[in-house]
Image (tube, grey):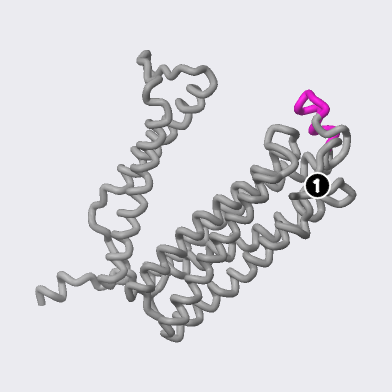
């Protein structure tokens, strides 16, 4: 009778008191203050906070905050994995975890909508963009006068093929997991991680040889913000999948319980879809009629 009263008669899990929300807030606050202070130091050469000279600290405040955030992410997710392995992720809890991931991806979609909005606003109305900037950045045309653009069917096309292939390998890994094929799961994840790393290398090479810079024009600013943040998401997704690969090699995940892997796969497919829009709009559409730069 005592055991019957002690065991919850519902599908919800009341988590143990956790320090991670508070520690994450502290880390994010320190990181934000550090980022502002670092930029101020780069601008003026000095760093004064609350009447004290922190010039010697420079970027260390930001670095300390970043380390706190990264450790919190590791520890908090480790606790979540432990809860799942202990059987606390019931059907209702798993459903709510999926709702949370869906809302997170929806917020990421709106994040990229902002960059697409900025790009199309400047591209479709270059004259108005020049007035807002109080400088004839565009020359009344798009791409702006004097700007040579990247060939969309060179490195950008290579990266498109790479990401589409990675989408198939992560799907292969998912199906292998559902059929309890551990070898297929590991190989599928390993190939996806390798393709993600390859994508990042190609994009870095493209940036190093781009014929325009961030500050050259509004074209360069919108190009690097949109594609750069996508590249950052590819990096995060690659790390996400690498963690899943290490967990899979250690015997983690089962056909019935694998939300961590499923969330990583959803995130990776989101990255794929965003890239297709970037490739079609920023690389192909925006290069129509423009001067294509010759990359060496």
Q: Could you tell me residue 170's position as x and y percent?
A: 53, 72
Identify the magenta region: 126-136
Q: Is residue 132 magenta?
A: yes
Identified at 41% across, 67% down, the residue is 244
Residue for badge 1: 293
Q: Could you tell me residue 263's position as x and y percent?
A: 47, 65
Q: Is residue 4 magenta?
A: no
The answer to whether residue 206 is above or below residue 56 is below
Question: Left or right of 219: which side holds 176?
Answer: left
Question: Left or right of 212: which side holds 30?
Answer: left
Identified at 58% across, 55% down, the residue is 200
* 62, 194: nearer the viewer: 194
Mark 1 Cα-neighbour bin, 10 Å: few <14, some 14–19, many ≥20: some
Question: Left or right of 226: which side holds 177?
Answer: left
Image quadrant in which you'd find residue 83? bottom left
Image quadrant in which you'd find residue 274? bottom right
Image quadrant in which you'd find residue 168? bottom right
Q: Main secondary structure of the magenta part?
A: helix
* 215, 113: nearer the viewer: 215
Say if residue 114 shows up in the picture. Answer: no
Q: Could you tell me residue 213's position as x and y percent?
A: 70, 37
């Amino acid at each position: 009778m005592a055991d019957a009263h002690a065991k919850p008669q519902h599908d919800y899990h009341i988590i143990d008191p956790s320090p991670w929300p508070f520690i994450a807030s502290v880390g994010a606050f320190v990181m934000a203050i550090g980022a502002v202070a670092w930029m101020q130091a780069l601008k003026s050469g000095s760093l004064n906070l609350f009447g004290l000279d922190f010039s010697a600290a420079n970027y260390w405040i930001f670095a300390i905050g970043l380390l706190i955030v990264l450790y919190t992410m590791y520890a908090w997710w480790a606790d979540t994995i432990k809860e799942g392995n202990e059987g606390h992720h019931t059907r209702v809890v798993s459903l709510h975890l999926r709702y949370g991931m869906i809302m997170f991806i929806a917020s990421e979609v709106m994040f990229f909508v902002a960059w697409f909005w900025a790009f199309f606003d400047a591209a479709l109305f270059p004259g108005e963009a020049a007035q807002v900037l109080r400088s004839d950045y565009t020359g009344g045309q798009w791409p702006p006068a004097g700007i040579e653009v990247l060939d969309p069917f060179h490195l950008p096309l290579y990266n498109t093929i790479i990401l589409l292939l990675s989408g198939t390998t992560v799907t292969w890994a998912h199906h292998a997991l559902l059929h309890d094929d551990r070898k297929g799961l590991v190989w599928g994840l390993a190939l996806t991680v390798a393709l993600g790393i390859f994508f990042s290398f190609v994009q870095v090479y493209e940036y190093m040889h781009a014929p325009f810079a961030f500050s050259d024009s509004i074209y360069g600013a919108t190009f690097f913000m949109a594609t750069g943040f996508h590249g950052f998401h590819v990096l995060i997704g690659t790390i996400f999948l690498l963690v899943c690969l290490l967990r899979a090699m250690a015997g983690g995940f089962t056909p019935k319980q694998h939300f961590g892997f499923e969330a990583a796969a959803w995130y990776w497919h989101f990255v794929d879809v965003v890239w297709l829009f970037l490739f079609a709009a920023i690389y192909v559409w925006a290069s129509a009629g423009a001067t294509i730069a010759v990359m060496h």
